[in-house]
Image (spheres, grey):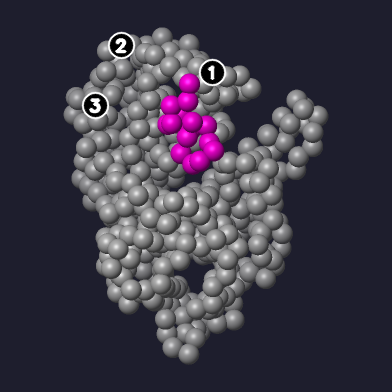
C-alpha cells in the first residue's frame, strides 16, 4: 500500500489523501484549501498532486467544504469513478457544493465588473450536477467492497450530520486495516451520537486540529450562553455570531431553544441570516434517524423540531438581511461564513463591531490567516470591504461548541485502538500535529511509528 498526502498536511484545510491498494487508487476526501495566501490557495485548488483521471473512487468522510469542496473540480478534470459516502453526507454535499459554485460565479462577476479582471470559477453548477450523479451511498456499519481485496465500512464520527470514520480492510499478502478518522467528533454533543470507537487497526490517519487544546465541556455551555445573552440584553446590545452554516449553527439554535423553553434567557429574536444555513437546517429535519436519543427525548417525542420555533426567523432575501442593520432591539444574528471571509457576516461585522454594547460570539475554529482569526486574537482594526473597521465590540469564544475532539479526547480515542503499527497526523496546524505525535509517544507510550505528513509526501507501507 502507498499513501500520498495531497492536502491537510500541516494545515487544517484541503483534506486529500491518495491511497494505492491492491491495484486501485482511492482518494480519501477531496477538500478545498481555504484561508491564508489566496493566490497559493487558488493554485492548490486548481491543480491536484495526482491525475484525477487515474483515481478509481473517492471515500468522502463528510460534507464540510474543506473535505468535499473540490469534488466538482476533480470531476471537471476527468474523474469518472464513484464517490462513496453516507446518504446524509451525499445530500448535504450537494447543498454545500451548489452554494460554492454560486459564490465562485458571483465572485468572478464582481471582479470583472469592478476590477476589470477575468477569473474563472474553479467549477460551476453544471460541474456540481455531474458530480452528484457519481455518489453511491452506504449507511453506518454497512460493509461494501471496492474489489475482492478491498472492503470499506463507514462508522459514525460524531462530528457533523452524516460524518464517517472510514475503515478499509484490505489484503496484500495478508489482511490489514487502515482507519481514517476524517474529522473526529466529541461525546455528549447536541443532536449527534458519540463517535464510534474503532477497536483495532494497523494504520491510522488521524486529524490533529485541537491536539494541544482542552475544550470546555459541552455541559458548561448552557450556563456560559445564559450569562452572555443576559448581559448583552441588559445593555441593549446585539450578539453577532459568525455562523458555520453546517452543524455549528444547528447546535447553537438547539441550545438556545432549550434555554428559551427553560426560561433561562429572555426570548429575543434570533435571525439566521444565511440561505445556506436555512437549507441545511431543512436537511437536518429530513435526516432525523441520525439524531441521538437526547434529541428525541427533548424535542421529537414532544412533537417539536429543535430548529423551528416562534422566536427564530430564517432570512432569505438580501432586503431581509439589510433590514437587520437597522433593527433597534437586542437580537442574535447568526450569519455565514464562519471564518468571516465571505458572505453576509462581513456586512454585519462592518455595521456592529464598532459598538461596545455588542458582542461577537465565536463558536468555531478560525484558521490561520482568516478574518475570524484576527477577531479572536483581538486586532484593533479589521479590514472589511477595503475599509479598516475598529473592533470595539466584546469578543467571546465558546470552544465547547467545537465539533472536533480536543487533546484528551483524541488521545483517549487513539489509545483504545489495538495493534497500531503506524500513525499519520494530519488536518492540524504544524504545531498541533507535532504535539499529537509527541503525546502519542510520551502520554500513550505507544511504540508504533508516528509521522507528521508533509504536503506531497509519500509512504510505502
Residue placed most toward the observer, 108 or 209:
209
Residue 15 pos. (x, y %): 53, 56
**Magenta segment, which residues?**
366-380
At a point 35% along the width and 43% down the height, the residue shown is: 402
Q: Is there any visible trace of residue 270 in the rendered image?
A: yes
Q: Secondary structure at mark 3?
A: helix
At a point 61% along the width and 56% down the height, the residue shown is: 71
Mark 1 vs 3: CB contact within 8 A: no
Instruction: Specify whether 113 is left or right of 388.
Output: right
Q: Which residue is denoted by mark 2 in the rendering?
A: 235
Residue placed most toward the observer, 289 or 432:
432
Answer above or below: position of 195 versus 420: above
Q: Is there any visible trace of residue 16 in the rendered image?
A: no
Identify the mark nearer the N-term, 1 or 2: 2
Residue 273 pos. (x, y %): 47, 27
Answer above or below: position of 200 versus 120: below
Residue 125 pos. (x, y %): 66, 46
Q: Which secondary structure type mostly characterizes the magenta part of the structure?
A: loop
Q: Which residue is denoted by mark 1 in the rendering?
A: 389
Amino acid at each position: 500500500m502507498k499513501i500520498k498526502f495531497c492536502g491537510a498536511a500541516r494545515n487544517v484545510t484541503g483534506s486529500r489523501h491518495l491511497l494505492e491498494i491492491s491495484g486501485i487508487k482511492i482518494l480519501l476526501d477531496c477538500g478545498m484549501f481555504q484561508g491564508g495566501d489566496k493566490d497559493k490557495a487558488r493554485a492548490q485548488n486548481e491543480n491536484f498532486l495526482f491525475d484525477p483521471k487515474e483515481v478509481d473512487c473517492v471515500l468522502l468522510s463528510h460534507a464540510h467544504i474543506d473535505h468535499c469542496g473540490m469534488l466538482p473540480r476533480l470531476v471537471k478534470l476527468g474523474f469518472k469513478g464513484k464517490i462513496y459516502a453516507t446518504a446524509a453526507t451525499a445530500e448535504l454535499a450537494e447543498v454545500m457544493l451548489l452554494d460554492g459554485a454560486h459564490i465562485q460565479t458571483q465572485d468572478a462577476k464582481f471582479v470583472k465588473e469592478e476590477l476589470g479582471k477575468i477569473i474563472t470559477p474553479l467549477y460551476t453548477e453544471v460541474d456540481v450536477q455531474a458530480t452528484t450523479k457519481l455518489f453511491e451511498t452506504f449507511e453506518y456499519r454497512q460493509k461494501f467492497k471496492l474489489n475482492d481485496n478491498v472492503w470499506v465500512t463507514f462508522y459514525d464520527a460524531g462530528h457533523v450530520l452524516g460524518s464517517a470514520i472510514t475503515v478499509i480492510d484490505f489484503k496484500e499478502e495478508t489482511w490489514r486495516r487502515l482507519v481514517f478518522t476524517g474529522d473526529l467528533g466529541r461525546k455528549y454533543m447536541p443532536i449527534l451520537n458519540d463517535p464510534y470507537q474503532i477497536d483495532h487497526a494497523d494504520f491510522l490517519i488521524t486529524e490533529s486540529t485541537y491536539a494541544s487544546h482542552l475544550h470546555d465541556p459541552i455541559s458548561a455551555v448552557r450556563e456560559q450562553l445564559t450569562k452572555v445573552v443576559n448581559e448583552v440584553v441588559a445593555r441593549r446590545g446585539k450578539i453577532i455570531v459568525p455562523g458555520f452554516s453546517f452543524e455549528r449553527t444547528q447546535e447553537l439554535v438547539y441550545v438556545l431553544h432549550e434555554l428559551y423553553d427553560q426560561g433561562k434567557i429572555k426570548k429575543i429574536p434570533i435571525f439566521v441570516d444565511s440561505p445556506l444555513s436555512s437549507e441545511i437546517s431543512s436537511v437536518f429535519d429530513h435526516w432525523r434517524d441520525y439524531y441521538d436519543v437526547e434529541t428525541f427525548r427533548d424535542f421529537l417525542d414532544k412533537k417539536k423540531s429543535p430548529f423551528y420555533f416562534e422566536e427564530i426567523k430564517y432570512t432569505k432575501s438580501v432586503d431581509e438581511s439589510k433590514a437587520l442593520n437597522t433593527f433597534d432591539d437586542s437580537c442574535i444574528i447568526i450569519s455565514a461564513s464562519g471564518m468571516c471571509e465571505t458572505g453576509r457576516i462581513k456586512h454585519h461585522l462592518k455595521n456592529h463591531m464598532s459598538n461596545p454594547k455588542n458582542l461577537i460570539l465565536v463558536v468555531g475554529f478560525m484558521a490561520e490567516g482568516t478574518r475570524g482569526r484576527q477577531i479572536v486574537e483581538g486586532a484593533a482594526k479589521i479590514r472589511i470591504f477595503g475599509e479598516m473597521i475598529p473592533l470595539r465590540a466584546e469578543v467571546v469564544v465558546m470552544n465547547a461548541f467545537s465539533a472536533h475532539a480536543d487533546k484528551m479526547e483524541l488521545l483517549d480515542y487513539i489509545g483504545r485502538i489495538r495493534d497500531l503499527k503506524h500513525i499519520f497526523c494530519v488536518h492540524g496546524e504544524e504545531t498541533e500535529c507535532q504535539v499529537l505525535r509527541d503525546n502519542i509517544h510520551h502520554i500513550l507510550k505507544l511504540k508504533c511509528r508516528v509521522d507528521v505528513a508533509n504536503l506531497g509526501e509519500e509512504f510505502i507501507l
